[in-house]
Image (tube, rainbow, N blue to C red):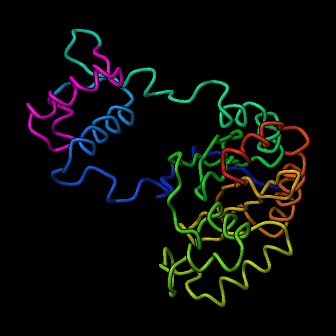
Amino acid sequence: MPRTRKTNPPSVSSAETLPDNAKPNGQLAGTLMRGLAILDTLISAGHPLTLAELAAHVKLDLSTTLRLLRSLEETQRVIRVGDGKHYLASPSTLRPLPLNHPLEELRRQADPLVRSLANKIKQSVVLVAYIGGERVVVDVMQAGSSLSPYYSTWLHGPLHASGPGKALLLATDPSKREVLLGEPPYVARTAKTITSKPALYADLERAAQNGYVLVRDEFYDGLSAIAANFYSWDKSALGCLAVTGYSADFDDETIAHISKELLACTRLMPLQVPSLQQIAQLSGR
């Protein structure tokens, strides 16, 4: 059975974050990119920021930052709070999706299944949807002292070295995998990352037989993940459930227990989550 740690686990940055060229880095070019950088800064800060703080973070002068803030205020993407000198992302920026959006419906409807799974296996469970061929985090469920992974909502981690990445590859037609992966050798995140095409395809073949993918110390040393796809009624993969934990806790017995519960949960998804039909339409399937 899975073992839990008594110490508080560290928060893990999965590196599945925005690509470097989409982050503020040096002087930003273009009004749109500058405005988006300000919004990203306000959203990630989690508290109101002053004009000077914003300008310093996005590396723009005060006058340019103020001009952009005024435009964002006019479009109701930014609001001023307190003394009027602190800026905050507006409600429409913080929660852009309507409550009846398919992704919101998926999160609510899948919650009992995902919560139950996390409690059974005593590990963190991540609910991921495949939208337009991309991996979108819909929810993260923890259980007790399980690992506290940090994920951006749009995963950009390497397909060949992460749980949701390998799960997406498993759901992708083999003829299209090479386009997604690029030319081998693939980037090595750790000493155990699979970097050759034959080894990766053999790993995916084993995953297809098992029904789930397994990543052991391939993305981060000391961390492992197990992921399984969930499907629509027409057998189209719409997303995956990924279990993340310490590699030391993932012995053979634990992997067998987790994979059994994980597969049982994914089989229930089309039976208990009616929004999967909407997700199929949203993802273009």
Please tell me whether residue 71 belongs to the stretch shown in magenta.
yes
Q: Is residue 39 magenta?
A: no
How far across and down, in percent of the image, does residue 197 sit?
A: 61, 87
Which residue is painted at 62% across and 49% down in the image?
Answer: 147
Of 11 and 282, nearer the camera is 282
Toward the viewer: 192 or 208? 208
Which portion, as a residue range, is magenta? 52-80
Point 78% across, 73% down: residue = 207
Whole-percent x, y for residue 109 in the image: 78, 32
Q: What kind of secondary structure does the magenta stretch mostly adopt? A: helix
Q: Is residue 3 left or right of residue 266?
A: left
Whether 201 is drawn above or below 26: the answer is: below
In the picture, which quadrant includes the C terminus?
A: bottom right
Vertical comparison of 117 with 19: above or below: above
Q: Quadrant of residue 230?
A: bottom right
Vertical relation: 209 (above or below) 212: below
The quarter in which the N terminus is drawn is bottom right
Q: In x, y percent, where is residue 142?
A: 67, 41
Image quadrant of residue 97? top right
- Based on the displayed image, in which of its 4 quarters is residue 52 positioned? top left
* The residue positioned farthest toward the top in the image shown: 83
* 151 left or right of 39 in image: right
Residue 227 x/y as whole percent? 73, 60
Q: Decide if residue 65 is on the left or right side of residue 179.
A: left
Please report the residue visible at 66 percent of the width from the left and 42 percent of the height from the top. Answer: 145
Marks counted in the figure total 0
Question: As rendered, which of 239 and 116 lies closer to the eye?
Answer: 239
